[in-house]
Structure formats: C-alpha cells, structure tokens
Amino acid sequence: MSYGYGQPGQQQQAYQQQQPQRPPAPGVDQNWLWGVFQNVDKDRSGQISAVELTTALSNGTWTPFNPETVRLMIGMFDRDNSGTINFQEFMALWKYVTDWQTTFRGYDRDNSGSIDKNELRTALTSFGYRLSEKFYDILIRKFDRQGRGTVAFDDFVQCAVVLQTLTSSFQAYDTDRDGVIQIAYEQFLTLVFSLRS
C-alpha cells in the first residue's frame, strides 16, 4: 500500500518540527515555580500525577483541561517512566505549555480563546504541514470537544503532539522523503501500536 500526505510536491515541508516557532517565554523564577509545584503536589510525594496536573492547568475556556492532553504531556516529560513528573520534569513541561500558549494566542486572531479551522490551517501551515481541506475538517471534528467548530488550547496542544508523533512514525518509513511509503499490513500495525501515547 502507498499513502502520501500533503499536497503533491510539498510533502517534504511537512516534516518540519511543529514546535512553537516563537522566542521562548522569558525565564520564570525557579523559586516561584517550586511554589507552584508544591501547590500542585497535593499528596506531597515530590511527584505530580496526571490528576494533580489536570487541576493546575487552565485551557482558558473555564472547562477542565483535556485529560488526554495531560496524559500525553506527562508521557513526554516523564523521563523515568514513573507515570508522574518530578520538579525538573515539571519545569520543562511548564516551559513547553507556556511556549504553546504563546503560539496559540498568536493564531487565535479573534481572541476568542479557541481557534477555528482557518486559524488551525494557518498554524499548521506555519509549522510546515501541507494538508487538504478535508483533513482540516477531520482535525476539527477530532479535536473539538465542545462541538462548536473550534479547538480549545489544550486540544490544540493534543492535536499538535499527535500530528508530530504520527509524522515522526511515518518519517521512519519514508526514507526517500517523498511523502509516500509502502508498507505491509503488519508493518502498519506495528507502526500504530508502537506509538508512544
């Protein structure tokens, strides 16, 4: 089977990392962040669980932060695979979330607190992705938890992380970087089930 992504002739650009492309937020006082960490660490274990982190995060819409996004972020920053994050890991996660907030606000042109399909297209295109209109419809349906045709901050982060994870997995098979791979069914299953989630 052969599968491509993006528009013809532009597939290579889709491999660009989709990390926020803005300057990092100014340094945060480590003592202040330690205080935040201690407030979030309700059980005083020295580790923050996904449940504890969920209570500390705000997506700007007065709704709980998406638990799946929190789980993905814990997985990204949990270096010792404990299922929790320590203070050092928390500092890295804090910077990551802050950078994504800055990026999100930059694409939320109408300052609504969520991004619509056009704003999502602008963001992902700036990250190097060249995707079809139909695929943007799919992304909106997948990551719009409120049913409003828009994506909130936490869901935007999840969308970006999932898209990057899938792109990296695809890239491992696309050795000639033409945006097309040919894999057997079992290879496809291996690719899917090997994704860190």
Image: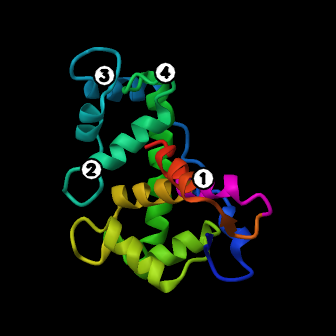
Q: In the picture shown, does residue 121 fall above or below 176? A: below
Image coordinates of residue 41 in percent, x first then y, are 28, 23
Q: Secondary structure at mark 1?
A: helix
**Residue named by callout 3:** 38
Specify whether residue 166 is painted magenta.
yes
> In the rendered view of the protein, which quadrant contains the C terminus?
top left
Between the residue at mark 3 and the residue at mark 4, the CA separation in whole angstroms equals 20 Å
Specify whether residue 48 is in view.
yes
Identify the residue at horizontal 35%, vertical 59% (top origin).
155
Asked where in the image residue 139 lies, by quadrant, the reply is bottom left
**Residue named by callout 4:** 80
Between the residue at mark 2 and the residue at mark 3, the CA separation in whole angstroms equals 20 Å
Decide which of tag 1 and tag 4 comes sooner along the chain.
Answer: 4
Q: What label sits on residue 169 in the rendered view? A: 1
Camera-nearest label, 1 or 4: 1
Identify the residue at horizontal 26%, vertical 26% (top origin).
39
Left-right relation of 67 to 88? left
Question: What amino acid is labelled 1 in the image?
Answer: Ser
Pick the front one: 68 or 190: 190
Query: Is the residue marked by circle 2 packed among few (<14), some (14-19), or many (20+) residues within 10 Å?
Result: many
